[in-house]
Amino acid sequence: MASVTEAQIRDALRAIPAPDGGGDIVARGMVTGLVLKNGNVGFSIEVDPREGAKLEPLRMAAEKAVEELPGVLSVTAVLTAHRGGGKAAAPQPQAQGHAHTHQHGAPQQRSAPGRTPVAGIQHIIAVASGKGGVGKSTTAVNLALALSGLGLKIGLLDADIYGPSIPRLLAITGKPDTTPEKKLNPMQKFGLKVMSMGFVVAEDTPMIWRGPMVMSAITQLLREVDWGQLDVLVCDLPPGTGDAQLTMAQSVPLSGAVIVSTPQDIALIDARKGLNMFRKVDVPVLGIVENMSYFTCPHCGGRSDIFAHGGARHEAEKMQTPFLGEIPLDIQIRETSDAGTPIVAQQPDSPHSAAYRAVAEQVWRQLNDQPLRPAPRIVIQ
């Protein structure tokens, strides 16, 4: 099968007239964020938000025009809200991101996702941080492996659309295939079922997407993947308090969130923001993990509190939330993560793996102690 090119895709989209009749959607600059990877196509169509609800036929026509090109395997098109006059609108929490993935031979019509559970998954938990660089993804991977070590069926969703790192941390390459029902099969490694945007786009490809596209992508990664039966789906969220976090809270009934921070004050300020955000949207905070808590010299055995120590424990006490444990700053954790063989998988009997297991045991205990919750109702003031 011949490979499709971006030029061919744009040529096909030139057949779609702009909604006001003044040229086509390409000539009017309405098509943005075009992504092409191994026959899988994604793009957004920028429209006036006041017209968004009426322009679903335009989105579907654009999808169909690209879908018919030789070499196209799937198409994801999103309506992105813009104010009139061509200037971008600030992302609104109520923005409607209509995203559908069509596979050849089986066009599907999907309703907008509701705040309902994902079939087959008992608990969904978010691993979050107020800022980047605190080791959140490493914590998420090792937490998922530690939960799996308790005999549970675990999935891992990399919801960091802009900077997916789970494929590197687990050394997973290739792309997922599809089921007969046109869902994606998750990749598998170390007994985990794994899904990431990094499996769809190249590692060095920047995701220049606005909020509605991010929200649509996360929704698809949640609901258009054949997760099977899972006890827990661990979601590695991007740092901060933005679209991804709100999408998770709006889309599914999260059983809880784990906040990752380092001990120093600047990280704790942002961790506090993340914790308060989950509380505002009625998501239970399962606790705080202090990552890079201390450093033990491998030569002399001396201990150094490089980023201070105990700050996360103190913050947990102040915020009246559980303190889940301390994870040291250690070269073995870094080396095993860089090699794609996380320490809980490679060295399950090490003290560091025991620290992650202790966190996992507390998380699982809390999940069993709390009743299953309905999805929160988001109120924007």
Image: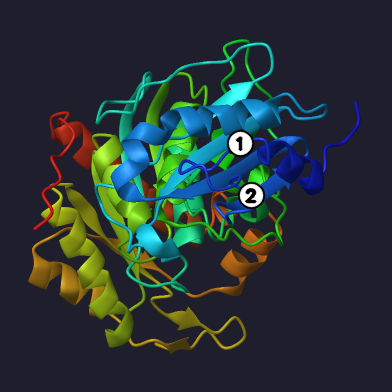
Whether residue 153 appears in this view of the structure is: no
Q: Is residue 140 above or below residue 21?
A: below
Alpha-carbon span between mark 1 and mark 2? 8 Å
**Which mark, by number, is residue 294?**
none
Element type at mark 2: loop
Q: Which residue is mark 2?
A: 26
Q: Which quadrant is home to the C terminus?
A: bottom left
Which residue is nearer to you in this view: 254 or 122?
A: 254
Task: Determine the residue positioned at 36% across, 76% down.
Answer: 262
Q: Is the C-beta separation of discs 1 and 2 under 8 Å?
A: yes
Looking at marks 1 and 2 on the same chain, the residue that comes earlier in the sequence is marked by 1
Give the image quarter of residue 289.
bottom left
Give how far across and how far down residue 77 sits, in percent: 54, 38
| Residue 1 spot, x, y in % from top left | 90, 26
Instruction: Out of 9 and 74, give the one closest to the viewer.
Output: 9
| Residue corresponding to mark 1 | 16
Question: In the displayed structure, would residue 24 be above or below residue 338?
Answer: above
| Dot 1 amino acid type | Ile
For residue 202, side relative to residue 356 (left or right): right
Residue at 48%, 54% (x, y): give it. Answer: 160
Instruction: Give the percent coordinates (x, y) of residue 207.
Output: 58, 58
Q: Amino acid at mark 2?
A: Val
